[in-house]
Image (spheres, rainbow, N blue to C red):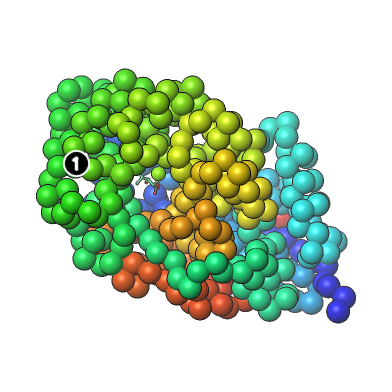
């Protein structure tokens, strides 16, 4: 059967939740005094939105084929992403056969090398790549995981990220990842508060439930080391993204200094096989956490994951809904997945990219059967009630 070609690429923004999941209303746990690198400025300490964590907004990429099939994806990128898609990347896509995914990725990456390599440009390339995989899988009438070699297990299991690991345990999740609330700028008192919070949560969840701390790039090596040492008695399973992403040397030192048995994880703000090669070869972490909507897409995550597997490292993608579930279920070195609790009080399960996607699957009792992911493509639809805006055309 002759495979269709790409007829048109369109890029939209949408506000309010969605893929830019930090773009939430007030009183949400995800913006409640969470430690960040900006916390050294008191005026930016109480809210990450105050320094602009949600300025980008969601990027929606739609790719229409000559047979009328439409693939799409959502990621973090907003209007900047729309410009890059419409004014730069579209030329490498329109007219191409829907199967030419490797070639299109290669052209998008090397054509933007002079201003890309990480951040918004790789987020945008990731969004295009995810839409291409959605399109190809829909043309072949298969779920994306079938194009990746198929499931290696019958179901996914999840840990939950949010303010209430105690509630997550009752919901059947295998662990709970807390956001760290206080950074070095709040001194010894802040460190004591961090450890007291962890101690309280350990009391509530008992001795065996996984507890992790997500430090969102906010610490320095000495503080991270002391936090890890203090957290050890409370059974901290891993310390996540303790340092800024460029401090490969700091991560390597931290990994040598944390108490034996504690895992060091990072990677959600890293991009491409080259960035993850640095993390792996410098011995920075035990688990890499690429976000498939930010690291280069499925095409790049395949390369990153194979490299990690050769290094004996686990790949547990940063929460990215169906886009990571279809990958995780096909890889032995991805034994579990992340689920971000997007309910404001982290007290109930709601779809991660709420309200943007229809049919977005969520864990039930902390698990998701492979059969839930058997619809063509990534198995989701855009919610027609979410107003899309197309700021640029080409
Ligand atoms: C909970 C963290 O502060 C971030 O908001 C979260 O998006 C990310 O770091 C994660 O690992 O889920
Ligand atoms: Mg994180």
Q: Is residue 371 visible?
A: yes
Residue 224 in which image quadrant: top left
Q: Residue at x 43, y 58 (%)?
A: 336
Q: Is residue 317 visible?
A: no
Q: Is 148 on the left or on the right of 74, as rendered?
A: right
Is 184 above or below relative to 77?
above
Q: Residues within 10 Å of mark 1 (few under 14, many from 20)?
A: some
Residue 69 in which image quadrant: bottom right
Considering the image in quadrants, where does the N terminus appear? Answer: bottom right
Q: Residue at x 46, y 26 (%)?
A: 252
Secondary structure of residue under mark 1: loop
Q: Position of residue 265 (x, y in %)?
A: 42, 40
Q: Position of residue 364 (x, y in %)?
A: 35, 73
Number of marks in picture: 1
Q: Residue at x 47, y 51 (%)?
A: 316
Residue with the mark numbered 1: 234
Q: Nearer the viewer, residue 45 or 148?
A: 148
Q: Is 335 on the left or on the right of 159, as rendered?
A: right
Q: Position of residue 175 (x, y in %)?
A: 30, 55
Q: Nearer the viewer, residue 164 or 265?
A: 265
Q: Position of residue 52 (x, y in %)?
A: 41, 38
Q: Is 335 on the left or on the right of 210, as rendered?
A: right
Q: Residue at x 71, y 51 (%)?
A: 86
Q: Is 104 on the left or on the right of 226, as rendered?
A: right
């Amino acid at each position: 059967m002759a495979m269709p070609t790409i007829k048109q690429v369109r890029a939209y923004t949408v506000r309010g939740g969605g893929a830019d999941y930090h773009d939430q209303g007030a009183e949400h746990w995800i913006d409640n005094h969470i430690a960040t690198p900006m916390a050294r400025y008191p005026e930016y300490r109480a809210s990450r939105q105050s320094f602009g964590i949600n300025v980008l907004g969601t990027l929606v990429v739609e790719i229409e084929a000559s047979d009328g099939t439409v693939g799409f994806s959502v990621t973090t990128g907003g209007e900047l992403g729309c410009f890059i898609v419409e004014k730069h990347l579209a030329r490498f896509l329109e007219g191409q056969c829907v199967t030419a995914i490797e070639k299109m990725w290669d052209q998008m990456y090397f054509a933007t090398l002079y201003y890309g390599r990480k951040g918004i440009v790789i987020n945008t390339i990731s969004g295009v790549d995810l839409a291409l995989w959605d399109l190809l899988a829909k043309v072949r009438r298969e779920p994306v995981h079938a194009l990746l070699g198929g499931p290696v297990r019958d179901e996914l299991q999840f840990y939950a990220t949010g303010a209430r690991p105690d509630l997550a345990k009752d919901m059947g999740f295998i662990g709970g990842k807390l956001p760290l609330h206080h950074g070095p700028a709040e001194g010894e008192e802040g460190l004591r508060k961090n450890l007291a919070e962890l101690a309280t949560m350990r009391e509530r969840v008992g001795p065996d439930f996984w507890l992790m701390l997500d430090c969102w790039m906010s610490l320095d090596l000495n503080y991270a080391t002391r936090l890890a040492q203090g957290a050890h008695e409370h059974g901290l399973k891993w310390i996540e993204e303790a340092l800024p992403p460029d401090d490969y040397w700091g991560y390597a030192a931290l990994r040598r200094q944390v108490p034996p048995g504690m895992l060091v994880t990072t990677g959600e703000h890293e991009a491409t096989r080259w960035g993850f090669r640095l993390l792996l070869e410098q011995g920075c972490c035990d688990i890499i956490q690429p976000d498939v909507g930010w690291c280069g897409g499925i095409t790049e995550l395949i390369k990153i994951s194979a490299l990690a597997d050769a290094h004996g490292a686990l790949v547990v993608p940063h929460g990215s809904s169906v886009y990571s579930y279809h990958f995780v279920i096909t890889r032995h070195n991805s034994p579990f997945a992340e689920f971000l609790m997007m309910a404001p009080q982290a007290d109930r399960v709601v779809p991660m990219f709420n309200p943007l996607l229809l049919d977005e699957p969520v864990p039930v009792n902390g698990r998701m059967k492979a059969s839930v992911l058997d619809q063509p493509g990534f198995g989701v639809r855009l919610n027609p009630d979410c107003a899309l805006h197309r700021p640029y055309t080409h």
